């Protein structure tokens, strides 16, 4: 592990994982950088630790700070293990998503309370590989009925209220494989399944966080209507629209984090 910077060590009050369009926390002060190698390999990039309103906050860009790691190749285990190694117990995951149902239009912030996993072929558990065998190979069957930590969800919803930031409380996140966006038929099926939001990185991250014993909640940033879900069913989703909407929706983020 290599380290640089000036922030002093100690417990981390909150770790934030940034998604598409969120590659740094501008308000973080006295930042130190940690390049770690975990027993699961390398995380997506350096963990930046600094102070935010007197609290120690860690930040990691899920796709790398230059957005070079696609959703299916992210080393989710290494990312979470790195944050845990540095002292994090609470993880707030920022996930850029498409909106499927009416309440989740572009630029909405939401704190989902359920998820459905449509991903495949990703390393989705701690129970495989060398580090697992070497640690004795105990099989974990974690409870996952409520995939996000209730206390952290409630704290986030209350923080948003205090900060005057609009946040939809609840919703079901559907995790797709990517990196391509979905077909209209896939979104029709997801709506039928009960999904309100669609993104590519919600799983296996949430499941791994539970296996690691981390508190974990998702702050979903709606960047676009999912394919065929908006008022114009023929709308083409562009990366520029996604980035513009994430930037606009993220305006409330500093106040929300300060209140949290
Ligand atoms: N689908 C999947 N992931 C996404 C989307 C989408 O429409 N928008 C942003 N991330």
Image (spheres, rainbow, N blue to C red):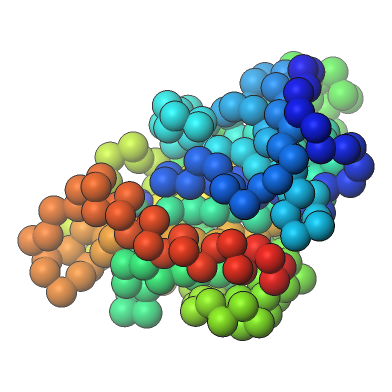
Nearer-the-camera pick, 140 or 110: 110
Q: Position of residue 244 (x, y in %)?
A: 30, 54
Q: In the figure, 162 relative to 96: above or below?
A: below
Q: Which residue is found at the position 32% from the left and 72% from the top? A: 105
Q: In the figure, 86 relative to 248: above or below?
A: above
Q: Is residue 193 rendered to the left or right of residue 163?
A: left
Q: Which residue is found at the position 89% from the left and 37% from the top? A: 9
Q: Which residue is found at the position 60% from the left and 68% from the top? A: 255
Q: Position of residue 80 (x, y in %)?
A: 70, 38
Image quarter of residue 186: bottom left
Q: Position of residue 44 (x, y in %)?
A: 57, 28
Q: Position of residue 245 (x, y in %)?
A: 33, 59
Residue 82 in sight from this viewpoint: no
The C terminus: image quadrant:
bottom right
Q: Is residue 72 rendered to the left or right of residue 258?
A: left
Q: Is residue 93 rendered to the left or right of residue 19?
A: right
Image quarter of residue 194: bottom left
Image quarter of residue 98: bottom left
Nearer-the-camera pick, 113 or 124: 113
The residue furthest left is 234
Q: In the figure, 157 relative to 193: above or below?
A: below
Q: In the figure, 219 relative to 32: above or below?
A: below
């Amino acid at each position: 592990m290599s380290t640089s910077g000036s922030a002093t060590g100690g417990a981390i009050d909150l770790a934030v994982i940034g998604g598409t369009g969120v590659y740094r926390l501008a308000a973080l002060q006295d930042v130190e950088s940690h390049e770690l190698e975990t027993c699961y390999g390398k995380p997506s990039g350096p963990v930046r630790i600094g102070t935010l309103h007197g609290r120690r906050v860690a930040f990691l860009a899920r796709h790398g700070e230059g957005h070079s790691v696609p959703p299916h190749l992210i080393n989710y285990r290494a990312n979470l293990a790195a944050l845990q190694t540095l002292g994090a117990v609470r993880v707030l995951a920022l996930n850029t998503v498409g909106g499927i149902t009416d309440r989740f239009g572009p630029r909405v912030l939401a704190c989902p309370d359920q998820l459905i996993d449509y991903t495949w072929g990703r390393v989705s558990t701690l129970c495989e590989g060398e580090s697992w065998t070497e640690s004795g190979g105990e099989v974990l069957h974690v409870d996952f009925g409520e995939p996000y930590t209730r206390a952290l969800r409630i704290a986030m919803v209350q923080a948003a209220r205090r900060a005057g930031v609009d946040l939809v409380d609840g919703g079901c996140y559907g995790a797709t494989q990517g990196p391509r966006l979905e077909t209209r038929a896939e979104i029709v099926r997801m709506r039928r399944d009960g999904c309100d939001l669609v993104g590519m990185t919600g799983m296996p991250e949430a499941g791994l966080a539970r296996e690691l014993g981390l508190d974990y909640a998702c702050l979903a940033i709606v960047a676009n209507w999912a394919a065929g879900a908006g008022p114009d069913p023929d709308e083409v989703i562009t990366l520029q629209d996604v980035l513009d909407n994430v930037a606009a929706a993220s305006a409330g983020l500093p106040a929300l984090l300060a209140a949290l």
